[in-house]
Amino acid sequence: MISETIDKHLISAACKLLRSAQSVAIVTHMSPDGDAMGSALAMYHYLKLIGKDPVAVLVPNAFPDFLAWMPAADQVVIYEDRQVECSTILSAADLVFCVDFNELKRIGKMADAVAQSPAKKIMIDHHLNPADFPDVIISHPESPSASELVFRFICQSGNFSLVNPPVAQCIYTGMMTDTGNFSFNSNHPEMYNILSELVRIGVDKDAIYNQVFNTFSADRMRLMGYCLYRKMKIYPKNHTALIWLDRRELYRFNFRAGDAEGLVNLPLSIKDVYYSVFIREDKDKLKISFRSQGDRPVNEYAATFFNGGGHKNAAGGESYNTMEQTLQCFESTFEEWFK
Ligand code: 5GP
Ligand code: MN
C-alpha cells in the first residue's frame, strides 16, 4: 500500500524503546502550528491506543485558537503557564518523542527540562540538519510534514489498523497546514494515497479546512488588511515583498497567538513576487518568517543573517536588535541572496 520510507532499523529501535516505556511525553516546537500540534496529538492518541499511560503533550507556549478543536488539544500542557508540571512530567518520563523540530533551540525555555530528562528520546522530524541529542533520529527533510512521518511510523510499526478518526484528523491537519492546503511541497504522489486512506478512515477534510482557515477573528482579518494596505513594501527588481509589524500595531489589533499565521504567504499571490519576508515584534525579540517559490532557497539566508533556518521555501529566524536595525540589516543583505 504505502511504501516503507523510514529505515527499518530505526523503526525497530524506536519500537524497542516504546515496549520498555510506560510514561511517555511528546514535545513539539515553540509557537506550535498545525503540523506541530497534528504530529504531537496524533502520536498522543496512538500511544494511548497501544496502552501507554500516562501520555502527555508538552508545548513551549500557547497554540492558536484555530487548533483548539483538535482531539485532545485540551489535554496539552503549556510550559509557559505550567512550568513545574512540565518539568515534573519530563523528569518522570521513560520516553520523550520530539516531533516537528530538529534542535533543542526550537523549544525555547523548555530545552533544559528536555535535555535534563533521563528519558530516552526519539525524534520524528522533517527539518534539515537534525541535532544528535535523541537516541533514535527519524529525520526526513524531504517529507512535506512531520504528521505524515507519524502516519508512516504507525504504519511501519504494523499498526495501521489502529489509525482511528482522532489520529487521522490530527495527521490530516498537519499535512494540510504544512503544505498550505496542498499548494506547496505537495507534488508527492504517495501523499495522496495517504490522504485517501485518512478520508476513508473518517476525516472530513472540508470540515477541517473550515475549522482552520475560516475561523478568523474580525481583528485578525483587519490586521491582514492593514498589513497589505499600509505595511507591505515591494522590491520589484528583486521580486521580493516585506511586511513588518511592531508591538504597538499588534496591540491595536488585539494580537493573539496564531494571528500572524499565513500572513507571510499573502504577498506571494502577487504576480512576479517570489520572495516574502515578515518581521514581527515578539516579547523579547523580533520573529522573522521567510517564504519563497520554486527553486529559490531562503533557509540559508535565514541561517546566515538571522540565526535561523528551516526548509527551502519556508524558513524562519530571529533578531535581538531593534526593528530599525533589523530592517536595515535585511535591506543591505537580501539583494545578493534573493535572485
Ligand atoms: P515560520 O515562519 O512559520 O515560523 O517558520 C517556517 C519554518 O521555518 C518552520 O517550519 C521552521 O522549520 C523554520 N523556522 C522558523 N523559525 C526558526 C528558527 O528560529 N530557527 C530555525 N532553525 N528554523 C526556524
Ligand atoms: Mn512541520
Image (cartoon, grey):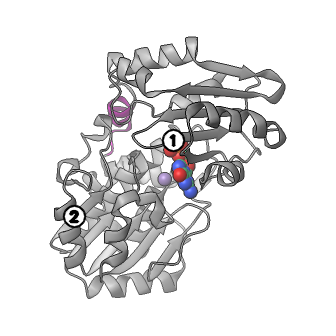
Q: Look at the numbered disc 2 and say if its residue's Cβ is closer than 8 Å to ligand 1.
A: no
- Mark 2 surroundings within 10 Å by alpha-carbon count, few (fewer than 14), some (14 through 19), many (20 or more): many
Is residue 229 shown left or right of residue 43?
Answer: right
- Secondary element under disc 1, as helix, strand or loop, is strand
Q: Are marks 2 and 1 in contact (CB under 8 Å)?
A: no
Quadrant location of the C terminus? top right
- Tell me where residue 33 sits by quadrant: top left
Vertical comparison of 9 with 320: above or below: below
Is residue 186 shown left or right of residue 81?
Answer: right
Which residue, given by chain and number where applicable, does mark 1 sit on? 287
Which residue, given by chain and number where applicable, does mark 2 sit on? 86
| Residue 103 image point, x, y percent | 50, 66
Query: Magenta stretch: residue 250 in it?
Result: no
| Residue 247 image point, x, y percent | 43, 28
Q: Mark 2 belongs to which amino acid? A: Cys
Q: Which residues are magenta?
A: 203-212
- Secondary element under disc 2, as helix, strand or loop, is helix
Which of pointers 2 and 1 lies earlier in the amino acid sequence? 2
| Residue 225 image point, x, y percent | 49, 14
Residue at the spot x=34%, y=15% of the render?
218
Query: Magenta stretch: residue 205 in it?
Result: yes
Depth check, front residue: 224 or 301: 301
Spatial separation of the CA atoms under disc 2 and disc 1: 25 Å
Residue at the spot x=58%, y=18% of the render?
231
Q: Look at the numbered disc 1 and say if its residue's Cβ is closer than 8 Å to ligand 1.
A: yes
Q: Is residue 69 visible?
A: yes
Vertical comparison of 95 with 61: above or below: below
